[in-house]
């Protein structure tokens, strides 16, 4: 009996010791390092949520691999922006709010969520687990990137009115449901021109970015997030 009680007491003490032992909780982790700058798993997760602010089809929903690859490109660009003489114009608060207003009125997913109203916009943000601060920070950086790219790459690029019309008819309008009226061409032509300019810039930009990747020290610490070589070389980020 005494031996049994002793064993029970020992088991109880061991159980209490295990309960008292602190549990380690993984809050975040480094998934890649770009020239000694870390990219965290939370950065990838946030970027995937923020992709809801871009026009896309169901087949274009980003995965963690492609998102990390864009973040690597973005980090390389940011670092290079600090080294080059080309200066990106700092977007004002008004610029950021104007871009948000465009998204609320024109983004197909936002139109479906009735983002033109404050209630619809709040619901859209909540559904995509986004905060106003995250949206503003993302768009501010995006506008700064666009300024840098325009100053460095866009000279000499011209988008014809026929190209804008074709994008509107073949790409934008089909994203709206049959019972929804798409915005008039005149209302979105400037935004379409921006998109087409980005596509043209990509052709010039990809070689520059490939060179940055070759010269930079990029380490992906999570093997599951490695991109196939050919796909990675074609995934430039000009946000």
Image: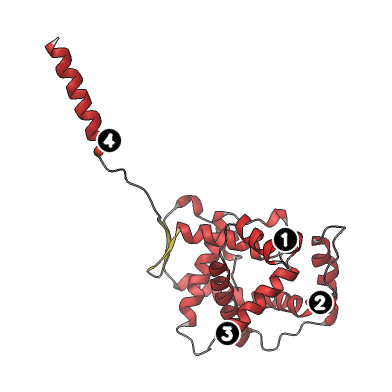
Kindly identify which numbered label has been placed on residue 19. 4
Nearest-to-viewer mark from 2 and 3: 3
Earlier along the polypeptide chain: callout 3 or callout 4?
4
The residue under label 1 is 109
Image point (73%, 57%), residue name: 57
* Residue 33 visible, this orientation: yes
> How far apart are the two marked residues, 1 and 3, measured between alpha carbons?
26 Å
Mark 3 burial class by Cα count in 10 Å: few <14, some 14-19, many 20+: few
Earlier along the polypeptide chain: callout 1 or callout 2?
1
Mark 4 burial class by Cα count in 10 Å: few <14, some 14-19, many 20+: few
Label 2, secondary structure: give it. helix
Q: Give the quadrant of the C terminus.
A: bottom right
Q: How many marks?
A: 4
Earlier along the polypeptide chain: callout 4 or callout 2?
4
Earlier along the polypeptide chain: callout 1 or callout 3?
3
Label 1, secondary structure: give it. helix
Label 4, secondary structure: give it. helix
Q: Specify the color scheme.
A: secondary structure
* Residue 228 visible, this orientation: no
* Residue 201 percent coordinates (x, y): 66, 78
| In the foreground, 161 or 55 | 55
| Dots 1, 2 in contact, CB < 8 A | no
> How far apart are the two marked residues, 4 and 1, measured between alpha carbons?
48 Å
The residue under label 2 is 164
Mark 2 burial class by Cα count in 10 Å: few <14, some 14-19, many 20+: many
The residue under label 3 is 92
Q: Give the quadrant of the N terminus.
A: top left
* Residue 235 percent coordinates (x, y): 60, 65
* Residue 161 percent coordinates (x, y): 84, 81
Residue 104's place in the image compared with 230, above or below, is below
Residue furthest top in the image: 1
């Amino acid at each position: 009996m005494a031996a049994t009680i002793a064993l029970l007491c020992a088991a109880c003490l061991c159980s209490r010791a295990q309960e008292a032992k602190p549990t380690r909780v993984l809050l975040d982790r480094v998934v890649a390092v770009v020239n000694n700058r870390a990219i965290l798993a939370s950065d990838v997760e946030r970027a995937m949520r923020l992709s809801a602010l871009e026009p896309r089809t169901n087949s274009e929903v980003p995965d963690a691999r492609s998102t990390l690859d864009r973040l690597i490109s973005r980090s390389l660009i940011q670092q290079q922006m600090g080294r080059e003489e080309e200066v990106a114009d700092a977007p004002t608060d008004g610029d950021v709010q104007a871009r948000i207003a465009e998204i609320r009125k024109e983004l197909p997913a936002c139109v479906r969520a009735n983002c033109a109203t404050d209630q619809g916009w709040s619901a859209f943000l909540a559904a995509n687990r986004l905060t106003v601060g995250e949206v503003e920070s993302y768009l501010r950086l995006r506008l700064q990137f666009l300024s840098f790219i325009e100053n460095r790459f866009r000279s000499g690029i011209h988008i014809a009115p026929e190209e804008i019309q074709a994008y509107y008819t073949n790409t934008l309008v089909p994203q709206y449901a049959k019972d929804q009226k798409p915005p008039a061409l005149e209302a979105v032509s400037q935004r379409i021109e921006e998109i087409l300019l980005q596509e043209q810039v990509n052709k010039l930009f990809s070689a520059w970015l490939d060179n940055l990747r070759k010269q930079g020290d990029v380490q992906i610490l999570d093997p599951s997030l490695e991109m196939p070589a050919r796909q990675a070389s074609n995934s430039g980020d000009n946000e």
